[in-house]
Image (cartoon, grey):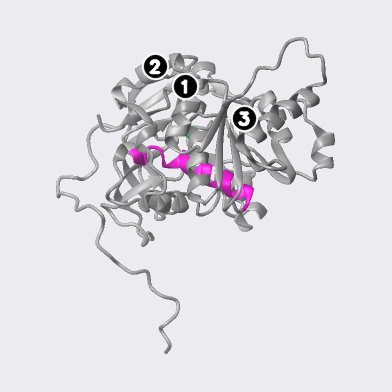
């Protein structure tokens, strides 16, 4: 009998050796949002796992704008919390227990936790586009609880191994890096391209780092704050502009004003005919309009910023320049692995982005600090889940 196919998964040593007394026990503190600007710490049972699941001891969780919006408004858009919700969707940890069917990860493995829980059977999931899944669940999106807790059970396919030399602080920022990888994928090849990134928050900065790692010839940062531009230029951008404020009483049309501003910028950059790619991470209408104006004919615009749901869009210019306008939603298959590969090879560095860490027990302080720091150079807060 030919047993050469299918290959059995290679059994290997786990990343960490667990001590005999490392069995899951004790507290499982969860950060639960109960209403606007109200979170409580709640000790919940350590979750049971199914045959295809792993139990993860959660070590770190990044806090992003979505978490802050949930905290401040009690929901994001139509996703309003009707019952208490555990926050957190940017986590990493150590696998402690594996279901009986799990072969690809072992207890002791250090893993990043993918927060999307797609159905894997609908037409989009079957086509590999699980970010379109109509029945998907996602960490910290009602009614699915998030991972700002100490123990979390998830399908083993959602546990992506991370290298040993990555600190837990950095590991708490892998999810936004995966989102940036997806945005870059949506733009197509960035090699030798001039790439503008609007918005110098964590996601914009990660897009710049990914564009640079992918071989972009220029990475141009745009923001309304000079401090954030300065940071972006130190981090990954080759150039940067504070987006000029449009005068209240324009003597020309908005399009003519954008053309003049973008022309001056292109002259300063020494780029003939316009930029190749715009990655829009601010969600601001003026940024969208200036971005379209900066693009060369045949250029690509990726809309990733979640701003106002309805904006005024330069349709004529889009048609006349044959622009490719694309959206970007969450992440897809392999984005975590690609992000981790960039980290492992030293092409992206997450350390400069981490402003501060807080223990899980002080998560509310982190939200309050993040609220005050909105729009400043304060970049990324990471919660240490076991502290
Ligand atoms: Zn996030
Ligand atoms: Zn699906």
- Name the residue nearer the viewer: 57 or 373: 373
Q: Which mark is residue 369?
A: 2
Magenta stretch: includes residue 361: no
In terms of secondary structure, where does tag 3 sit? loop
> Magenta region: which residues?
170-188
Res 42 quadrant in image: top left
Mark 2–mark 1 Cα distance, whole angstroms, equals 18 Å
Would you place residue 310 above or below residue 51 in this image?
above
Quadrant housing the N terminus: bottom left
Most extreme residue toward the bottom is: 1
Mark 3–mark 2 Cα distance, whole angstroms, equals 22 Å
Residue 169 as seen in the image, left or right of residue 197: left
Q: Is the residue indicated by label 1 positioned so its CB lies within 8 Å of ligand 1?
A: no
Residue 208 as seen in the image, left or right of residue 344: right
Q: Earlier in the sequence, mark 2 or mark 1?
A: 1
Residue at mark 3: 306
The answer to whether residue 28 shows anywhere in this view is yes
Q: Earlier in the sequence, mark 1 or mark 3?
A: 1
In terms of secondary structure, where does tag 2 sit? helix
Which residue is rendered at x = 37% and y = 53% of the image?
A: 345
Residue at mark 1: 227
Residue 319 as seen in the image, left or right of residue 357: right
Would you place residue 10 above or below residue 91 in this image?
below
Q: Residue 272 appears at what percent x and percent y?
A: 69, 43
Q: Which mark is residue 64?
A: none
Would you place residue 12 above or below residue 70 in this image?
below
């Amino acid at each position: 009998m030919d047993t050469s196919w299918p290959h059995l998964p290679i059994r290997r040593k786990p990343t960490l050796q667990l001590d005999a007394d490392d069995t899951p026990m004790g507290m499982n503190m969860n950060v639960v949002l109960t209403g606007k600007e109200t979170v409580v710490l709640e000790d919940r049972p350590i979750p049971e796992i199914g045959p295809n699941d792993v139990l993860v001891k959660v070590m770190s969780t990044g806090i992003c704008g979505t978490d802050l919006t949930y905290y401040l408004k009690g929901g994001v858009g139509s996703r309003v919390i009707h019952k208490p919700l555990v926050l957190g969707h940017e986590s990493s940890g150590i696998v402690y227990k594996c279901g009986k069917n799990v072969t690809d990860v072992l207890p002791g493995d250090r893993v990043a936790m993918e927060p999307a829980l797609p159905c894997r059977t609908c037409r989009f999931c079957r086509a590999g586009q699980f970010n379109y899944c109509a029945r998907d669940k996602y960490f910290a999106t009602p009614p699915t609880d998030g991972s700002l807790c100490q123990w979390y059970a998830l399908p083993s396919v959602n546990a992506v191994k991370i290298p040993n030399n990555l600190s837990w602080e950095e590991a708490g920022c892998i999810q936004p890096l995966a989102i940036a990888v997806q945005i870059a994928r949506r733009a197509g090849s960035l090699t030798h391209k001039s790439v503008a990134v609007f918005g110098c928050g964590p996601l914009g900065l990660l897009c710049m780092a990914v564009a640079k790692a992918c071989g972009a010839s220029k990475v141009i940062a745009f923001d309304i704050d000079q401090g954030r531009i300065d940071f972006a230029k130190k981090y990954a951008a080759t150039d940067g502009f504070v987006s000029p404020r449009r005068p209240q009483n324009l003597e020309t049309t908005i399009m003519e004003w954008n053309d003049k501003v973008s022309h001056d910028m292109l002259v300063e950059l020494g780029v003939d005919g316009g930029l190749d790619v715009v990655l829009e991470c601010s969600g601001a209408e003026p940024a969208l309009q200036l971005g379209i104006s900066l693009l060369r004919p045949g250029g690509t615009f990726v809309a990733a910023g979640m701003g106002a749901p309805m904006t005024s869009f330069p349709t004529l210019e889009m048609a006349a320049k044959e622009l490719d306008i694309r959206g970007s939603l969450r992440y897809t298959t392999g984005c975590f692995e690609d992000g981790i590969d960039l980290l492992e090879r030293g092409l992206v560095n997450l350390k400069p982005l981490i402003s501060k860490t807080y223990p899980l027990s002080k998560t509310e302080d982190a939200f309050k600090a993040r609220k005050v720091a909105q729009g400043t150079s304060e970049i990324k807060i990471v919660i240490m889940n076991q502290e």
